Image: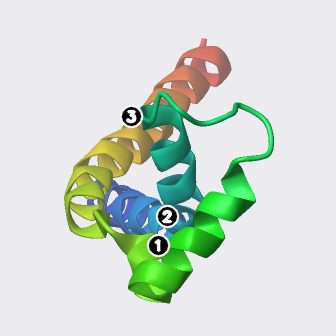
Amino acid sequence: PDELNYFISGGLAGMLGWTVAMPFDVPKTNVQSRWDTRVVGSYFPEMISIIRKRGVLGLYDGLGPVLIRAFPANAALFLGVELGKRSFDDYIWKN
């Protein structure tokens, strides 16, 4: 059924999106959560510091919980958009 396809596609797309975005999100979150960093110019030094201390995989810290959240959130979003689009099209074109 189309609904299951929308649901699974949305969930997997969300997980892939977060997997790609995570290395950029971790340094941003570290900079935002510390009180002693400058707003401008702290991002790349933080990224380099993470890589030196924990390796490249350090940029993926916290990925597990993010992926667990991403699947249902994005699956529901895709399903809602597609069902809403279908309902709207049915209403507009059948009336």
Work out whether residue 20 can be spotted. no
**Dividing the picture into quarters, in which one does residue 27 lie?**
bottom right
If you read the primary sequence from the N terminus, does the residue marked by circle 2 or circle 1 appear first?
A: 2
Q: Which mark is residue 80?
A: 3
Q: Which residue is mark 2?
A: 22
Q: Residue at x 66, y 23 (%)?
A: 93
Q: Amino acid at mark 2?
A: Met
Residue 57 is situated, as x and y percent measured from the top left of the image, at 41, 85
Q: Mark 3, residues whose alpha carbon is within 10 Å: few (<14), some, or many (≥20)?
A: some
- Rounded to the nearest whole Å, what is the CA distance between mark 2 and mark 1? 7 Å
Q: Is residue 17 above or below residue 50?
A: above
Q: Is residue 48 left or right of residue 12?
A: right
Q: Nearer the viewer, mark 2 or mark 3?
A: 2
As displayed, is residue 95 above or below residue 68? Answer: above
| SS state under label 2 | helix
Which residue type does callout 1 highlight? Answer: Leu
Where does the N terminus fall, quadrant-wise? bottom left
Mark number, residue 78: none
Q: Nearer the viewer, mark 1 or mark 3?
A: 1
Image spot of residue 8 (x, y percent): 31, 65
Task: Estimate the x, y position of residue 20 in percent, counting from the top left.
Answer: 56, 71
- What secondary structure is found at the residue carrying circle 3? helix
Of label 2 and label 3, which has the lower sequence position? 2
* Residue that badge 1 annotates: 59
Which residue is the extreme one toward the front?
36
Asked whether disc 2 touches disc 1, contact meaning CB atoms under 8 Å apart, the reply is: yes
